[in-house]
């Protein structure tokens, strides 16, 4: 197994220079850095993280806490963040809280015992779950605005406006809102922006809540069948797929009789029939900014909290038609 001195000898540099490159520290030119990295690849050198941690106090590990890996959005988000972290020289421990507040709390505590240097957290519960943890390790929050934390979130308000503008452009004037739980702040932001933009020209004939699930509640199914809108605005893509399934099973054509629009742009959007019109979140940018804020927080723990809002875009597909 190659050692640090072997990499140094092959690259023709000092051991200290190799260490600077691998730890992204010190002043090393791009040419020398590339030479060292080429030697690392050629020798298949793998840093001894345990020895590094003992020597530097840095484990080069991060924690990622996500609420529900059954939702296709979150595996994609996990993969994006893990790939980005790896390029920065960090390994990632993933916690799936399975929509459980207790699992979320236990998962964060487990990450702290693992010695992670920081945590990226998509909250399932309220702020107090991680308040104690935030005093022991830097945390960046995804998608929620929690006081006292660095935050990276999509522009939910812009997404709600884009949904409204697109449906009005397509001639839809009577729609139903099937939102996710309104206890979730991002859901309220989407809904309020949609409501303000749409009601200037159209009518919302009913407004209901549903879990973020493909299963549409009996009460919501009954309302959908009783008072049919020209389009349903779903709280996220999972709910939207559930609506399409419900309507199809009832013999109601989508989009021929009722159009459907979602939010998130999960992988299912392109394989469901009809393909789903939705709002795309820029996961690559979210991952990059979350890691950037986390690195800054690790290196400068006393800086003021920061918030980054990432733009979204409409992805038109087959589930919405002109009326």
Image (cartoon, helix red, strand yellow):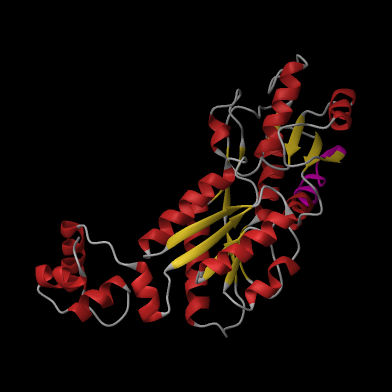
Toward the bottom, the furthest residue is 302
Residue at (29%, 71%) from the top-left corner?
22
Residue 243 picture quarter: top right
Q: Is residue 288 magenta?
A: no
Against 47, residue 235 (above or below) is above
Q: Quadrant of the C terminus?
A: top right
Q: Judge from the rendering whether residue 88 lies leftward or rightward of residue 67; answer left or right.
A: left
Against 151, residue 167 (above or below) is above
Tell me the magenta residue range: 194-206
Q: Quadrant of the N terminus?
A: bottom left
Give coordinates of residue 284: x percent, y percent. 47, 54
Against 233, residue 322 (above or below) is above
Residue at (56%, 68%) from the top-left corner?
113
Q: How many marks?
A: 0
Give coordinates of residue 7: x percent, y percent. 16, 68
Q: Judge from the rendering whether residue 152 lies leftward or rightward of residue 56; answer left or right.
A: right
């Amino acid at each position: 197994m190659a050692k640090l001195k072997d990499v140094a000898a092959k690259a023709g540099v000092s051991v200290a220079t190799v260490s600077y490159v691998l730890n992204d520290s010190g002043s090393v030119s791009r040419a020398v850095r590339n030479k060292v990295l080429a030697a690392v690849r050629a020798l298949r050198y793998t840093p001894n993280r345990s020895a590094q941690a003992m020597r530097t106090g840095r484990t080069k590990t991060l924690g990622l806490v996500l609420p529900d890996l059954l939702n296709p959005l979150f595996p994609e988000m996990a993969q994006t963040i893990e790939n980005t972290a790896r390029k920065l020289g960090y390994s990632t421990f993933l916690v799936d809280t399975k929509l459980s507040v207790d699992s979320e709390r236990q998962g964060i505590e487990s990450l702290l015992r693992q010695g992670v240097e920081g945590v990226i957290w998509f909250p399932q519960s309220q702020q107090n779950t991680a308040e104690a943890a935030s005093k022991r390790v830097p945390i960046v929050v995804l998608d929620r605005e929690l006081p006292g934390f660095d935050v990276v979130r999509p522009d939910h308000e812009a997404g709600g406006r884009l949904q409204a503008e697109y449906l009005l452009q397509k001639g839809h004037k009577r729609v139903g809102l099937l939102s996710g739980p309104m206890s979730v702040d991002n859901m309220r932001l989407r809904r309020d922006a949609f409501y303000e933009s749409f009601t200037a020209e159209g009518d919302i004939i009913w407004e209901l809540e549903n879990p973020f699930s493909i299963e549409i509640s009996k009460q919501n199914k009954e309302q959908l069948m009783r008072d049919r809108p020209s389009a349903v605005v779903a709280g996220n893509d999972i709910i939207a797929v559930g609506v399409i399934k419900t309507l199809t099973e009832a013999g109601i054509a989508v989009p021929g009789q009722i159009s459907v629009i979602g939010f998130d742009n999960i992988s299912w959007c392109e394989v469901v029939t009809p393909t789903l019109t939705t709002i795309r979140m820029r996961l690559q940018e979210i991952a990059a900014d979350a890691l950037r804020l986390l690195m800054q927080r690790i290196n400068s723990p006393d800086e003021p909290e920061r918030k980054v809002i990432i733009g979204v875009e409409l992805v038109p597909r087959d589930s919405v038609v002109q009326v």
